Image (cartoon, rainbow, N blue to C red):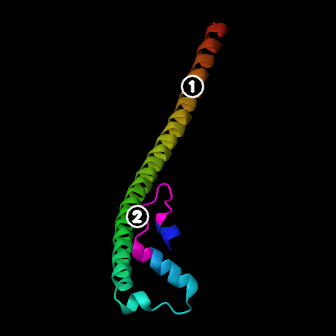
C-alpha cells in the first residue's frame, strides 16, 4: 500500500489514500465492503459519478453544437450545388444560343458572298 501511495506517475495526480486502500482491498479480497461500510468509498464513487455525468453533459452539448454546424454546412453545400447546377445550365443554354447565332451569321455571310460572286 505504501509503495502505491508513494509511486507517482507523470501526468497524473497523486493517488489518494482512499483510492490506494480501495485498490489493495479489491486485489486481496473477494467482496470488498470495508470502505462502503465505513461510508468512505460511496462518497468517492458518487463524486466520481457526478464528474463523469458532468463531462458527459459537456460532451453532449459539444456534440449537439457540432451536429448543428454540420447540418448548416450541408445546407450551404446543397445551396451551392444548386447554384452551380443552375449556372451550368445557363452556360449550356447560352452556348447553344451562340452556336445558333453563329450558324445564322455564317449562312447570311454565305448568301452575301454568293450574291457578290454572281454579280
Which residue lies most toward the front here? 2
Q: Residue at x 46, y 74 (%)?
A: 20
Magenta highlight on residue 12: yes
Give the SS element for disc 2. Answer: helix
Residue 45: quarter of image: bottom left
Q: 48 and 35: which one is in front?
A: 35
Q: Residue at x 46, y 59 (%)?
A: 12
Q: Residue at x 38, y 75 (%)?
A: 48
Q: Position of residue 100 (x, y in %)?
A: 56, 32
Please tell me the numbered disc located at residue 88.
Answer: none
Q: 103 and 28: which one is in front?
A: 28
Q: Position of residue 116 (x, y in %)?
A: 62, 8
Magenta stretch prevailing secondary structure:
loop
**Cβ–Cβ under 8 Å for marks 2 and 1:** no
Left or right of 104 in this view: 117: right
Check disc 2: other Cα within 10 Å, few if <14, some if 14-19, many if 20+. Answer: few
Q: Is residue 85 above or below residue 27?
A: above
Q: CA distance from mark 2 to mark 1?
A: 57 Å
Q: Is residue 67 above or below residue 26?
A: above
Q: Which one is in front in this view, the residue at disc 2 or the one at disc 1?
A: 2
Residue 55: quarter of image: bottom left
Q: Quadrant of the C terminus?
A: top right
* Residue pointed to by mark 1: 102
Left or right of 109 in this view: 52: left
* Residue pointed to by mark 2: 63
Q: Position of residue 1 (x, y in %)?
A: 50, 74
Magenta highlight on residue 23: no
Q: Position of residue 26 (x, y in %)?
A: 53, 84
Q: Give the extent of the magenta segment.
A: 6-19
Left or right of 51 in this view: 98: right
Amino acid at each position: 500500500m505504501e509503495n502505491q501511495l508513494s509511486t507517482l506517475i507523470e501526468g497524473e495526480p497523486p493517488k489518494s489514500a482512499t483510492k490506494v486502500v480501495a485498490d489493495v482491498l479489491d486485489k486481496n479480497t473477494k467482496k470488498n465492503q470495508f470502505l462502503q461500510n465505513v461510508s468512505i468509498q460511496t462518497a468517492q464513487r458518487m463524486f466520481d459519478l457526478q464528474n463523469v455525468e458532468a463531462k458527459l453533459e459537456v460532451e453532449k452539448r459539444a456534440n449537439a453544437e457540432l451536429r448543428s454546424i454540420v447540418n448548416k454546412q450541408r445546407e450551404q453545400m446543397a445551396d451551392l450545388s444548386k447554384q452551380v447546377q443552375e449556372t451550368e445550365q445557363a452556360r449550356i443554354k447560352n452556348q447553344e444560343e451562340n452556336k445558333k447565332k453563329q450558324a445564322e451569321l455564317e449562312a447570311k455571310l454565305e448568301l452575301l458572298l454568293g450574291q457578290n460572286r454572281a454579280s
